[in-house]
Amino acid sequence: MSELVVVTQHDHWAVIRLARAAKRNALNREMRTALRTHLEALKPHARVIVLTGTDAVFCAGLDLKEREAEKAAGQADTAGDEALELNVSMREHPAVFIAAQNGLALGAGVTLVNSCDLAIAADSASFGCPEIGFATYASMAGPTTQQTVQRRRAAWLLLTAERIDAATAERWGLVNEVVAAAQLDARATELAERIAQFDPVALREVKQALNRIPTEITGWRAGMEYGQSVNDAIRRETTAAAQGLAHFAQGGRNPGQG
């Protein structure tokens, strides 16, 4: 297995660390393949996956030098398709993803953050979409950012190529929370352990509901009806909901209250 992607497994959760710091964690073919392999292997084990980087960099995007070298050698340009499938596999994965953004995220690195369900950033982190400088639309970071934040905020990233800091990213809604860099791993661990205690079927179905509303289901009534169907699906697969409600009715504590 590639040494450029390091996985550490815990009780019902795991950390995936991008470990190509010398190249600013630029996603080359080896890393893209390793990430897909690890994600598939973690499906039966991890309810939560924390994605983070190394040193001062989260991910500086795709490895453009490798991509151009492969094209010059006459190889098919599949980097974009591979990156797209990687991010789709994160969204469709049953685990909840937490981005622990330790530093710089550019282009495809921003896409990775956007593809996670939750995102925490170190106060030293920054975000940028430099693609317009290459006369290119950020084909993955663009759409995923546009589906995450208001149009003018997405336009700033896509049209100016200027980077924004972590505080701005939090204000815009790209990340949930900003913490001191020294506290990032501890905070990610705290969240992962908290979420990993919940029922895996419920986590999977709630994640899919987050994916579908409002991108696919937009009506007020349609949303609530879909919400009922989500709970029906959960109850068909697990008795956790019935057990939890019965326990609560008898004076027990709701585990979601911490």
Image (cartoon, rainbow, N blue to C red):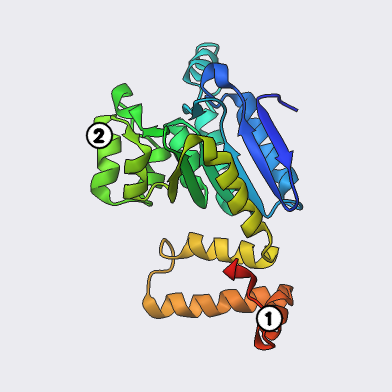
Callout 1: few (<14), some (14-19), or many (20+) C-alpha neighbours within 10 Å? Answer: few
Q: Which residue is mark 1?
A: 252
- Element class at badge 1: loop
- Residue in the image at 28% along x and 52% along y: 150
Quadrant of the image occupied by residue 14: top right
Q: Is residue 187 visible?
A: yes
- Location of the C terminus by quadrant is bottom right
For label 2, the SS is helix
Crowding at dot 2, Cα within 10 Å, few <14 / some 14-19 / many 20+, comes out as: some
| Res 76 → quadrant | top right
User: Could you say where residue 196 lies in the image, as x and y percent from the top left?
Assistant: 67, 57
Q: Is residue 116 above or below residue 4?
A: below
Along the viewing direction, whichever of 159 and 13 lies nearer the viewer: 13
Residue 88 in sight from this viewpoint:
no
In the figure, 147 relative to 5: above or below? below
Residue type of the residue flagged with mark 2: Leu
At label 1, the amino acid type is: Gly
Which comes sooner in the sequence, label 1 or label 2? 2
Camera-near label (1 vs 2) is: 1
Q: Position of residue 85 (x, y in %)?
A: 57, 41
Marks 1 and 2, how far apart in space? 53 Å
Mark 2 = which residue? Answer: 159
Q: Position of residue 93 (x, y in %)?
A: 63, 52
Residue for point 32% across, 42% down: 168
**242 relative position to 68: left or right:** right
Residue 33, position in %: x, y? 65, 31
Name the residue at 66% across, 54% down: 193
The residue located at (64%, 70%) in the rendering is 255
Nearer to the camera, 135 or 31: 31
For the N terminus, the quadrant is top right
Which of 117/71 is in front? 117
